[in-house]
Amino acid sequence: MKPSPFTRLAVALGILLSVGLAAGAARAAPIVVKFSHVVAEKTPKGQGALKFKELAEAALPGKVEVQVFPNSQLFGDGKEMEALLLGDVQIIAPSLSKFDRYTKKLQIFDLPFMFDDMDAVDRFQSSPAGQALLDSMKTKGIKGLAYWHNGLKQLSTNKDKLTRPEDVKGLKFRIQASDVLEAQFRQLGANPQKLAFSEVYQALQTGVVDGQENTWSNIYSQKIHEVQKTIAVTNHGAIDYMVIANAAWWDSLPDDVRAGLQKAMAGATAYANKLAADINDRDRQRIADAGEAKIQELSKRDVAAWREAVRPVWSKFQDQIGEDLIAKARASNGD
Ligand code: LMR
Protein backbone atom coordinates (compact mmCIF):
# COMPACT_ATOMS: atom_id res chain seq x y z
CA MET A 1 0.00 0.00 0.00
CA LYS A 2 1.27 3.43 -0.91
CA PRO A 3 1.77 5.69 2.11
CA SER A 4 -0.64 8.61 2.12
CA PRO A 5 0.79 12.12 1.71
CA PHE A 6 -0.03 12.65 5.35
CA THR A 7 2.07 9.65 6.46
CA ARG A 8 4.94 10.78 4.25
CA LEU A 9 4.80 14.22 5.80
CA ALA A 10 4.73 12.76 9.31
CA VAL A 11 7.77 10.53 8.56
CA ALA A 12 9.66 13.47 7.04
CA LEU A 13 8.87 15.63 10.05
CA GLY A 14 9.94 12.83 12.36
CA ILE A 15 13.28 12.51 10.60
CA LEU A 16 13.84 16.25 10.71
CA LEU A 17 12.98 16.33 14.37
CA SER A 18 15.35 13.52 15.34
CA VAL A 19 18.21 14.93 13.26
CA GLY A 20 17.61 18.28 14.93
CA LEU A 21 17.53 16.71 18.38
CA ALA A 22 20.72 14.77 17.73
CA ALA A 23 22.50 17.89 16.53
CA GLY A 24 21.26 19.75 19.59
CA ALA A 25 22.41 16.95 21.85
CA ALA A 26 25.83 16.95 20.18
CA ARG A 27 26.06 20.69 20.69
CA ALA A 28 25.01 20.41 24.30
CA ALA A 29 27.25 17.49 25.33
CA PRO A 30 30.00 18.88 27.55
CA ILE A 31 33.62 17.94 26.95
CA VAL A 32 34.51 15.54 29.73
CA VAL A 33 37.88 16.23 31.34
CA LYS A 34 39.05 13.38 33.54
CA PHE A 35 41.64 14.50 36.12
CA SER A 36 43.21 11.60 37.97
CA HIS A 37 45.63 11.76 40.89
CA VAL A 38 47.02 9.55 43.63
CA VAL A 39 46.69 11.55 46.85
CA ALA A 40 43.85 12.30 49.28
CA GLU A 41 41.47 15.21 48.71
CA LYS A 42 42.59 17.10 51.80
CA THR A 43 46.13 17.56 50.44
CA PRO A 44 47.45 20.48 48.36
CA LYS A 45 47.05 18.54 45.10
CA GLY A 46 43.63 17.19 46.10
CA GLN A 47 42.43 20.72 46.84
CA GLY A 48 43.95 22.12 43.65
CA ALA A 49 42.18 19.54 41.51
CA LEU A 50 38.81 20.36 43.09
CA LYS A 51 39.42 24.09 42.64
CA PHE A 52 40.26 23.49 38.98
CA LYS A 53 36.95 21.67 38.52
CA GLU A 54 35.05 24.50 40.19
CA LEU A 55 36.73 27.26 38.17
CA ALA A 56 36.63 25.42 34.84
CA GLU A 57 32.94 24.54 35.09
CA ALA A 58 32.09 28.10 36.18
CA ALA A 59 34.07 29.59 33.28
CA LEU A 60 32.68 27.18 30.68
CA PRO A 61 29.13 26.40 31.81
CA GLY A 62 27.70 23.42 29.97
CA LYS A 63 30.82 23.17 27.84
CA VAL A 64 33.06 21.13 30.09
CA GLU A 65 32.59 18.64 32.86
CA VAL A 66 35.66 18.01 34.99
CA GLN A 67 35.68 14.65 36.76
CA VAL A 68 38.25 14.37 39.52
CA PHE A 69 39.45 10.93 40.62
CA PRO A 70 41.61 11.12 43.79
CA ASN A 71 43.43 8.40 45.76
CA SER A 72 44.63 6.28 42.80
CA GLN A 73 40.94 5.43 42.24
CA LEU A 74 41.42 4.98 38.50
CA PHE A 75 45.12 4.14 38.29
CA GLY A 76 48.15 4.19 40.50
CA ASP A 77 51.18 6.28 39.66
CA GLY A 78 52.70 3.43 37.65
CA LYS A 79 49.85 3.54 35.14
CA GLU A 80 48.61 7.13 35.03
CA MET A 81 51.13 8.42 32.52
CA GLU A 82 50.32 5.62 30.12
CA ALA A 83 46.60 6.29 30.62
CA LEU A 84 47.16 9.94 29.78
CA LEU A 85 49.02 9.12 26.60
CA LEU A 86 46.29 6.66 25.59
CA GLY A 87 43.64 9.34 26.20
CA ASP A 88 41.94 7.43 29.02
CA VAL A 89 42.37 10.55 31.18
CA GLN A 90 43.07 14.08 30.05
CA ILE A 91 44.90 15.65 33.01
CA ILE A 92 47.16 14.22 35.71
CA ALA A 93 49.62 15.84 38.12
CA PRO A 94 52.49 13.47 38.90
CA SER A 95 55.21 14.50 41.28
CA LEU A 96 58.25 15.92 39.52
CA SER A 97 60.14 12.79 40.54
CA LYS A 98 58.11 10.61 38.18
CA PHE A 99 59.16 11.96 34.81
CA ASP A 100 62.61 10.55 34.24
CA ARG A 101 61.42 8.20 31.50
CA TYR A 102 60.23 11.27 29.56
CA THR A 103 62.86 13.89 30.32
CA LYS A 104 66.06 13.92 32.34
CA LYS A 105 65.80 17.67 32.92
CA LEU A 106 63.18 17.43 35.67
CA GLN A 107 65.63 15.36 37.71
CA ILE A 108 66.86 18.76 38.85
CA PHE A 109 64.05 18.75 41.42
CA ASP A 110 65.27 15.51 43.00
CA LEU A 111 68.88 16.49 43.62
CA PRO A 112 69.09 16.33 47.41
CA PHE A 113 69.25 19.71 49.20
CA MET A 114 69.02 21.56 45.88
CA PHE A 115 66.51 24.10 47.21
CA ASP A 116 66.80 25.80 50.61
CA ASP A 117 63.05 26.25 50.95
CA MET A 118 59.80 26.31 48.98
CA ASP A 119 60.30 29.97 48.05
CA ALA A 120 63.42 28.95 46.17
CA VAL A 121 61.50 26.14 44.45
CA ASP A 122 58.85 28.67 43.45
CA ARG A 123 61.40 31.16 42.15
CA PHE A 124 63.00 28.51 39.99
CA GLN A 125 59.69 27.21 38.63
CA SER A 126 58.59 30.76 37.77
CA SER A 127 61.90 31.62 36.07
CA PRO A 128 62.28 31.35 32.27
CA ALA A 129 64.31 28.14 32.74
CA GLY A 130 61.62 26.62 34.96
CA GLN A 131 58.81 27.65 32.63
CA ALA A 132 60.66 26.21 29.63
CA LEU A 133 60.63 22.81 31.35
CA LEU A 134 56.83 22.77 31.06
CA ASP A 135 57.35 22.23 27.35
CA SER A 136 60.23 19.78 27.65
CA MET A 137 58.07 16.73 26.90
CA LYS A 138 56.01 18.02 23.98
CA THR A 139 57.60 15.59 21.57
CA LYS A 140 56.48 12.77 23.89
CA GLY A 141 52.87 13.91 23.70
CA ILE A 142 52.89 15.65 27.09
CA LYS A 143 51.89 19.27 27.59
CA GLY A 144 52.91 20.88 30.91
CA LEU A 145 50.22 23.25 32.17
CA ALA A 146 51.47 24.34 35.60
CA TYR A 147 53.57 23.56 38.64
CA TRP A 148 51.76 22.85 41.86
CA HIS A 149 53.45 22.83 45.25
CA ASN A 150 53.29 20.24 47.93
CA GLY A 151 56.27 20.84 50.18
CA LEU A 152 59.59 19.69 51.56
CA LYS A 153 60.29 16.04 52.25
CA GLN A 154 60.98 14.50 55.63
CA LEU A 155 62.64 11.16 56.25
CA SER A 156 61.04 8.49 58.42
CA THR A 157 61.96 5.02 59.66
CA ASN A 158 60.76 2.32 62.01
CA LYS A 159 63.80 2.92 64.28
CA ASP A 160 64.14 5.08 67.39
CA LYS A 161 67.30 6.80 66.27
CA LEU A 162 67.29 8.92 63.16
CA THR A 163 69.58 11.91 63.40
CA ARG A 164 72.69 11.05 61.39
CA PRO A 165 73.21 9.63 57.89
CA GLU A 166 74.74 6.46 59.35
CA ASP A 167 71.40 5.71 61.06
CA VAL A 168 69.88 4.59 57.76
CA LYS A 169 72.68 2.27 56.66
CA GLY A 170 71.29 -1.10 55.60
CA LEU A 171 67.65 0.01 55.90
CA LYS A 172 65.11 -0.45 53.11
CA PHE A 173 63.33 2.64 51.85
CA ARG A 174 60.33 3.10 49.63
CA ILE A 175 61.08 5.64 46.90
CA GLN A 176 59.15 7.15 44.03
CA ALA A 177 60.10 5.99 40.54
CA SER A 178 63.20 8.18 40.28
CA ASP A 179 66.78 7.23 39.51
CA VAL A 180 68.06 10.23 41.45
CA LEU A 181 66.22 9.14 44.58
CA GLU A 182 67.56 5.63 44.07
CA ALA A 183 71.09 7.02 43.93
CA GLN A 184 70.44 9.17 47.00
CA PHE A 185 69.60 6.17 49.18
CA ARG A 186 72.40 4.05 47.74
CA GLN A 187 74.78 6.86 48.59
CA LEU A 188 73.63 6.53 52.19
CA GLY A 189 74.24 2.78 52.16
CA ALA A 190 70.50 2.09 52.27
CA ASN A 191 68.37 -0.08 49.97
CA PRO A 192 65.82 1.85 47.93
CA GLN A 193 62.76 0.21 46.41
CA LYS A 194 60.52 1.88 43.84
CA LEU A 195 56.90 1.42 44.90
CA ALA A 196 53.61 3.02 43.94
CA PHE A 197 52.26 5.60 46.34
CA SER A 198 49.17 3.54 47.13
CA GLU A 199 51.40 0.73 48.40
CA VAL A 200 53.45 2.75 50.87
CA TYR A 201 51.37 2.23 54.00
CA GLN A 202 51.18 -1.52 53.60
CA ALA A 203 54.82 -1.86 52.68
CA LEU A 204 55.75 -0.05 55.88
CA GLN A 205 53.24 -1.92 57.98
CA THR A 206 54.36 -5.34 56.83
CA GLY A 207 58.07 -4.53 56.98
CA VAL A 208 58.66 -4.81 53.23
CA VAL A 209 60.46 -1.50 53.75
CA ASP A 210 61.72 0.21 56.92
CA GLY A 211 61.30 3.81 55.91
CA GLN A 212 60.28 6.40 53.37
CA GLU A 213 60.50 10.09 52.52
CA ASN A 214 57.52 12.37 51.95
CA THR A 215 55.82 15.64 52.86
CA TRP A 216 53.87 16.15 56.08
CA SER A 217 50.56 16.16 54.20
CA ASN A 218 51.28 12.87 52.46
CA ILE A 219 52.59 11.29 55.67
CA TYR A 220 49.48 12.33 57.57
CA SER A 221 46.87 11.52 54.93
CA GLN A 222 48.36 8.08 54.30
CA LYS A 223 48.70 7.43 58.06
CA ILE A 224 52.41 6.79 57.59
CA HIS A 225 53.09 8.18 61.08
CA GLU A 226 51.13 5.24 62.49
CA VAL A 227 53.58 2.72 61.05
CA GLN A 228 56.86 4.60 61.61
CA LYS A 229 58.74 5.34 64.83
CA THR A 230 60.66 8.46 63.90
CA ILE A 231 60.22 11.27 61.40
CA ALA A 232 63.35 13.39 61.07
CA VAL A 233 62.89 17.00 59.97
CA THR A 234 65.40 16.80 57.15
CA ASN A 235 63.74 19.05 54.53
CA HIS A 236 66.15 17.36 52.12
CA GLY A 237 64.11 17.78 48.95
CA ALA A 238 60.77 18.87 47.56
CA ILE A 239 57.71 17.06 46.36
CA ASP A 240 56.02 19.25 43.81
CA TYR A 241 53.94 18.47 40.76
CA MET A 242 53.66 19.20 37.09
CA VAL A 243 50.07 19.31 35.99
CA ILE A 244 50.07 17.82 32.50
CA ALA A 245 47.64 17.18 29.69
CA ASN A 246 47.66 14.87 26.71
CA ALA A 247 49.16 17.30 24.17
CA ALA A 248 47.10 16.08 21.18
CA TRP A 249 43.89 16.42 23.17
CA TRP A 250 44.88 19.87 24.45
CA ASP A 251 45.69 21.10 20.94
CA SER A 252 42.43 19.71 19.59
CA LEU A 253 40.22 21.68 21.99
CA PRO A 254 38.12 24.57 20.64
CA ASP A 255 40.00 27.82 21.27
CA ASP A 256 37.50 29.19 23.78
CA VAL A 257 37.56 25.94 25.79
CA ARG A 258 41.36 25.82 25.84
CA ALA A 259 41.50 29.45 26.96
CA GLY A 260 38.89 28.85 29.65
CA LEU A 261 40.73 25.78 30.97
CA GLN A 262 44.00 27.68 30.96
CA LYS A 263 42.48 30.44 33.04
CA ALA A 264 40.92 27.94 35.44
CA MET A 265 44.32 26.27 35.75
CA ALA A 266 45.97 29.60 36.61
CA GLY A 267 43.35 30.19 39.30
CA ALA A 268 43.65 26.68 40.72
CA THR A 269 47.46 26.96 40.72
CA ALA A 270 47.42 30.21 42.69
CA TYR A 271 44.92 28.71 45.11
CA ALA A 272 46.73 25.39 45.66
CA ASN A 273 50.15 26.97 45.92
CA LYS A 274 48.98 29.42 48.56
CA LEU A 275 47.39 26.61 50.53
CA ALA A 276 50.23 24.08 50.37
CA ALA A 277 52.35 25.43 53.23
CA ASP A 278 49.35 25.75 55.55
CA ILE A 279 48.20 22.20 54.85
CA ASN A 280 51.68 20.84 55.55
CA ASP A 281 52.00 22.89 58.78
CA ARG A 282 48.56 21.69 59.86
CA ASP A 283 49.43 18.06 59.15
CA ARG A 284 52.78 18.28 60.92
CA GLN A 285 50.86 19.47 63.98
CA ARG A 286 48.33 16.67 63.63
CA ILE A 287 51.13 14.12 63.49
CA ALA A 288 52.67 15.64 66.62
CA ASP A 289 49.27 15.60 68.37
CA ALA A 290 48.65 11.98 67.39
CA GLY A 291 51.73 11.05 69.45
CA GLU A 292 52.58 7.99 67.40
CA ALA A 293 55.79 8.65 65.45
CA LYS A 294 58.29 10.94 67.19
CA ILE A 295 59.18 14.10 65.28
CA GLN A 296 62.95 14.41 65.45
CA GLU A 297 64.34 17.94 65.02
CA LEU A 298 67.89 18.02 63.68
CA SER A 299 70.72 20.33 64.69
CA LYS A 300 72.47 22.42 62.07
CA ARG A 301 75.43 20.08 62.36
CA ASP A 302 73.28 17.03 61.71
CA VAL A 303 71.68 18.63 58.66
CA ALA A 304 75.15 19.51 57.37
CA ALA A 305 76.15 15.86 57.76
CA TRP A 306 73.18 14.68 55.66
CA ARG A 307 73.92 17.32 53.06
CA GLU A 308 77.53 16.21 52.88
CA ALA A 309 76.63 12.51 52.73
CA VAL A 310 74.37 12.83 49.69
CA ARG A 311 76.31 15.49 47.84
CA PRO A 312 78.06 13.00 45.46
CA VAL A 313 74.65 12.33 43.87
CA TRP A 314 74.82 15.72 42.17
CA SER A 315 77.86 14.88 40.09
CA LYS A 316 76.34 11.56 39.01
CA PHE A 317 73.44 13.35 37.32
CA GLN A 318 75.05 16.59 36.28
CA ASP A 319 75.58 15.52 32.65
CA GLN A 320 72.00 14.31 32.23
CA ILE A 321 70.49 17.41 33.79
CA GLY A 322 72.99 19.95 32.47
CA GLU A 323 75.35 22.10 34.50
CA ASP A 324 73.67 25.21 33.24
CA LEU A 325 70.27 24.20 34.60
CA ILE A 326 71.84 23.18 37.92
CA ALA A 327 73.47 26.61 38.18
CA LYS A 328 70.15 28.32 37.49
CA ALA A 329 68.35 26.23 40.11
CA ARG A 330 71.06 26.98 42.66
CA ALA A 331 70.79 30.67 41.91
CA SER A 332 67.14 30.56 42.99
CA ASN A 333 68.37 30.05 46.56
CA GLY A 334 69.88 33.49 46.44
CA ASP A 335 73.24 32.19 47.70
C1 LMR B 1 54.69 9.84 46.18
O1 LMR B 1 54.63 8.91 45.35
O2 LMR B 1 55.21 9.69 47.29
C2 LMR B 1 54.13 11.18 45.85
O3 LMR B 1 54.59 11.53 44.59
C3 LMR B 1 52.66 11.15 45.85
C4 LMR B 1 52.11 12.47 45.42
O4 LMR B 1 51.57 12.54 44.32
O5 LMR B 1 52.21 13.41 46.21
Image (tube, rainbow, N blue to C red):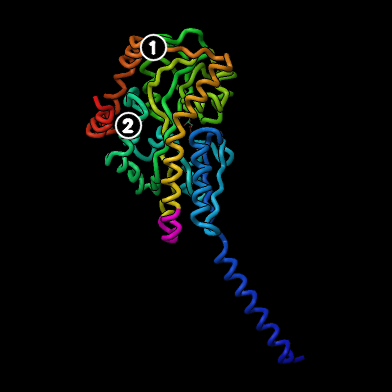
Q: Nearer the viewer, residue 57 or 178?
A: 57
Point out which mark residue 88 bears.
none
Disc 2 designates what residue?
108
Mark 2: secondary structure = helix
Q: Tell me residue 246's x, y (percent).
A: 44, 49
Residue 169 coordinates in the image, percent (x, y): 42, 11
Write the residue at 41% across / 60% down: 255
Q: Nearer the viewer, residue 151 or 308?
A: 151
Residue 106 drawn above or below residue 226: below
Which quadrant is the N terminus positioned in? bottom right
- The answer for how far apart the CA atoms under marks 1 and 2 are is 22 Å
Instruction: Tell me the SS state at disc 1.
Output: helix
State yes or no: discs 1 and 2 in contact (Cβ < 8 Å): no
Q: Nearer the viewer, residue 178 or 146?
A: 146
Q: Quadrant location of residue 254?
A: bottom left
Is the shortest distance between ligand 1 and the CB of mark 2 under 8 Å?
no
Residue 31 higher or lower than 217, as above or below: below
Tell me if residue 91 is in the magenta stretch.
no
Few, some or many C-alpha atoms within 10 Å of disc 2 (few <14, some 14-19, many ≥20)?
Answer: many
- Looking at the rendering, which quadrant does residue 124 occupy? top left
Disc 1 crowd, CA 10 A, few/some/many (<14, 14-19, 20+)? some
Q: Residue at x 31, y 22 (%)?
A: 313
Give the amino acid at mark 2: Ile
Identity, as a three-letter code, of the amino acid under mark 1: Pro
Which residue is label 1 attached to?
Answer: 165
Residue extending farthest top: 161
Query: Ligand 1 within 8 A of label 1's CB?
Result: no
Q: Earlier in the sequence, mark 1 or mark 2?
A: 2
Residue 252: give x, y in percent of width and height: 43, 59
| In-image side of 178 versus 203 (left or right) | left
Q: Which residues are magenta?
A: 251-260
